[in-house]
Amino acid sequence: MEEELAPHDTETVNAEETVSSPPELPSPQEDTLYNNAEEADVGFSASCLTTAELQQHWRAVKQEFRSVKLLFDIPDARIRELTMSKYVVYQIVVIRSGSYDCERVAIERRYSDFLHLHQELLLDFCEEMEDIVMPRKKMTGNFSEENIAERRVALRDYLTQLYSLRFVRKSQAFQAFFTHQELKDAYNLLRGGRFSRALEGLQKVLVLQEKLSHNPTLLIPTLCAILVCQRDLEDFDAAFQTGRRALPTVRRYELRQYQGPLLEALVDLGYSLELPVAQLQDELTRVRDSPYGQVSQVSLKELVVQEFV
C-alpha cells in the first residue's frame, strides 16, 4: 500500500497577499479602475444601475485582480508497463484554497514530464531558480512502493516551490505542463468528430486554466472549442451560454480573430433558441464592416480546428 498524504502534508502557497473585501463603494483609485474597465454586455450603462448593482459589478471587475492561492497534491501513482518500457505515472490534483473546491480535476504526468518542465524553466529563469531542486531519479528501486511514495511527496513539494515564484507560475511553460497534453488530445478528438469525449477533455482543461491562469484571454480558445462541441452535440442552450461567457473577454481585449466567428455562432444559436439577438446581429455587422472585418471571415469551427495542428 502506498503512503497516503495526511491533510497537513499539503502546503498552502501564499504567493501574494489576498485582496481584502471591496468596500461598499469604490475609492477614487478604484473608481478610476472601474471606469476604465470595459463593460461585459452591449448597452451597459452605469447610470441605469442601482447602487447594489454597481457594487455587484465592481466586485466582479475587482475579482480579476485577486490572487488565487493553490495547493498541489499527488495523492496517487501507478506503474504503467508497455511492450518495451515501464514507468511510473503520477496523479496531480490542483486545488484552490480558501474555500471548498468542488472541481478537483486530476491529470497524470511521468517523471520525464517534470524533468522537461524543469529544463524549460531553467532556460528562462536559471538564476532565479538556483534554490529550486528537481527531485533526482534513483538508479535502482524506482518501482518500489516506498520510493514511489517518497517521489510523490518530493514532486508535490517541487510544484509548490515553483508556484511560489511569481515569474514561474505565470510562465507559459509552467501552465502548459498542466494542460498541453490534454488540450492536444481534446483537439484531436474534436477534429475526428468525437465531440463527447473532446468536450469532456476541454471542460477538464478549462477548470485547470481558470485556476492557474492570470490571463483571461488564455481561456478563449478553450471556451470556443467547448461551444463548437456543444453545438455539434445539439446542446444549443449550453453552447449559447458558453459563447456569452467568452464574449466579454473577446470584446475587452479586442481578440479580433474570435470576435466575428463567435458573434456569428451566437446569432445562429440565438435564432435556433428563439432568443432576441438584434444587438448581437448589429455588433456582428459592425465587426464585418470594420477595417478588420476580413480577419473574422472564417467560421468558429474552422478557427478552432486550426489549434494544435
Image (tube, grey):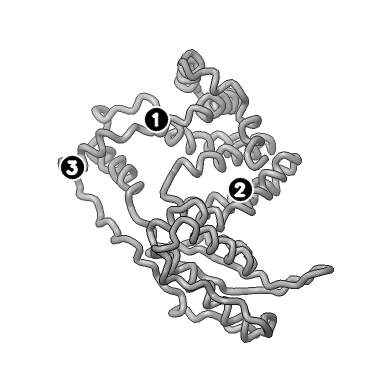
* Badge 1 or badge 3: first in the primary sequence: 3
The residue drawn where x is 68% and y is 84% is 140
- Nearer to us: label 1 or label 3: 3
Q: What element carries label 3?
A: helix
Q: In this view, does 97 lie above or below 192?
A: below
In space, the residues marked 1 and 3 are separated at their CA atoms by: 24 Å
Which of the labelled discs sits on residue 202, or is there none? 2
Check disc 2 and give the amino acid type: Leu
The residue tagged 3 is 29
The residue drawn where x is 71% and y is 44% is 188
- Nearer to us: label 2 or label 1: 2
Whether residues under marks 3 and 2 lie with C-beta atoms below 8 angstroms apart, the answer is no
The residue tagged 1 is 41
Whether residues under marks 1 and 3 lie with C-beta atoms below 8 angstroms apart, the answer is no
Q: In this view, does 19 lie above or below 162?
A: above
* Badge 2 or badge 1: first in the primary sequence: 1
Check disc 3 and give the amino acid type: Gln
Check disc 1 and give the amino acid type: Asp
